[in-house]
Amino acid sequence: MHPPRLRTSLPLPRPPSQYVCPSCLHSRTRPLRIPQFATQLPSRNLHATPPRHEALSFRAQQKEDAKRRRAQTGSKSTKSKSPLDAQLEKWELTVGIEIHAELNTARKLFSPAATSSNAPPNSHVALFDVAFPGTQPQFQQATLLPALRAALAMGCQVQRKSSFDRKHYFYQDQPAGYQITQYYEPFARDGAITLYDYDGIAPEDGKSITIGIKQIQMEQDTAKTLAQPPASFLLDFNRVSHPLVEIITLPQIHHPATAAACVRKIQAVLKSVNAVTAGMEAGGLRADVNVSVRRRGDAAGEQSYHGVAGLGQRTEIKNLNTFKAVEEAIRAEMARQIAVLEAGGTVEGETRAWTTGGTETRKLRGKEGEVDYRYMPDPDLGPVIIGEVSHDGASKEQPD
């Protein structure tokens, strides 16, 4: 029986041999032998390159096998064309975009009421905002400054003189029965925005594409409608007369992905110059898209929009509030128009809607034109005059 071992750091005296097992005594006296494999272990180094494993994963092995087969046959693998690519080979898609963005201002466009996005409903409403009889609009000059920043960032020519017009239509979110906008004389014209491949444009558009901007105009926003099923609607007039800029592009976009990239790039530019405070994710920017198709190789279409001729009949999809919705709505509407034309039908000029997660657009109403809106100069608002800036930074003229 072995005596108990004491736990101490001091060396113990060697016991007499008659009390120790001879084999144990022999094991204590022989030198420590280091295993052979321990001397071959690599030193630990944080910057050392980890050993490369020769074994490949199943997916990597599949890729290697595919490369080997292609090298042996001398042919490259080709992916099957998507339905969209097949359609675009036969049909030409044309898209124009109208972007409505809320300006970064403290006051509304035609009233001294404060702008707000998270305030309680109907807490920032002036009498003019709800079309109280006898009230008149008062143009707030400070709202012009972020609009000018947006126009300059888009490369537009700022007009020294602009004016406001009335766009008549009757809807529950427009208490006056008309919207004040700039139709005949907008404050900015003839701009452009360039999109690059890293912006997410379609590969068919190459490394870059430039989209023309017809004009940028100021206008007032409408009320916010909250649906209460089954048949009730609540109106929040905080948003009425919130200053907007409407950016109208030329119909020079020919792919849904490029259209979504255009909206995304315009939002980024507006934020970078502090023209807006919120984008699509917060409801501060909305897009309407005009979609038309025509068969490639046929005679040019009979329609003309914003000076671009030879197009097919367009339809407008209203109030798209995400980049994904822009792309998906265009794809769905393009497929619908192609199906109508291939069946021998005629595309009607309509205003249509898109529901997130849906598969097709739905008709809202027939497309209105200039005659339907009865545009007329607003008799209560004078022109806006942008004066020249002198060398000392002072303006010679003030906006009217």
Image (spheres, grey):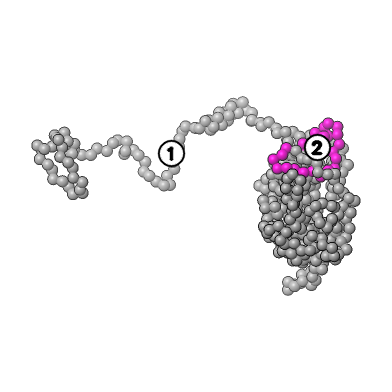
Question: What residue is disc 1 on?
Answer: 51
Q: Nearer the viewer, mark 2 or mark 1?
A: 2
From mark 2 to mark 1, how far is it between C-alphas? 59 Å
Q: Residue at x 30, y 35 (%)?
A: 36
Instruction: Describe the element under mark 2 as helix, strand or loop.
Output: helix
* 143 w.r.t. 361: above or below: below
Q: Residue at x 85, y 40 (%)?
A: 348
Question: What residue is disc 2 on?
Answer: 337
Query: Would residue 68 be found to the left or right of residue 101 on screen?
Result: left
Q: Residue at x 74, y 33 (%)?
A: 86
Q: Is any part of residue 142 visible from this angle?
A: yes
Instruction: Tell me which amino acid carries mark 2.
Output: Gln
List x then y, in percent, for residue 297.
83, 35
Quarter of the rendering occupied by the C terminus: bottom right
Task: Examine the structure image and report whether residue 342 is included in the region drawn in magenta.
Answer: yes
Query: Would residue 364 be found to the left or right of residue 203 on screen?
Result: right
Q: Residue at x 70, y 54 (%)?
A: 284
Q: Which residues are magenta?
A: 334-359
List x then y, in percent, for residue 89.
76, 35
* 284 w.r.t. 394: above or below: above
Instruction: Tell me which amino acid carries mark 1.
Output: Pro
Residue sitting nearer the eye, 77 or 86: 86
Residue sitting nearer the eye, 365 or 163: 365
Which callout, 2 or 1, points at the residue further toward the start of the chain?
1
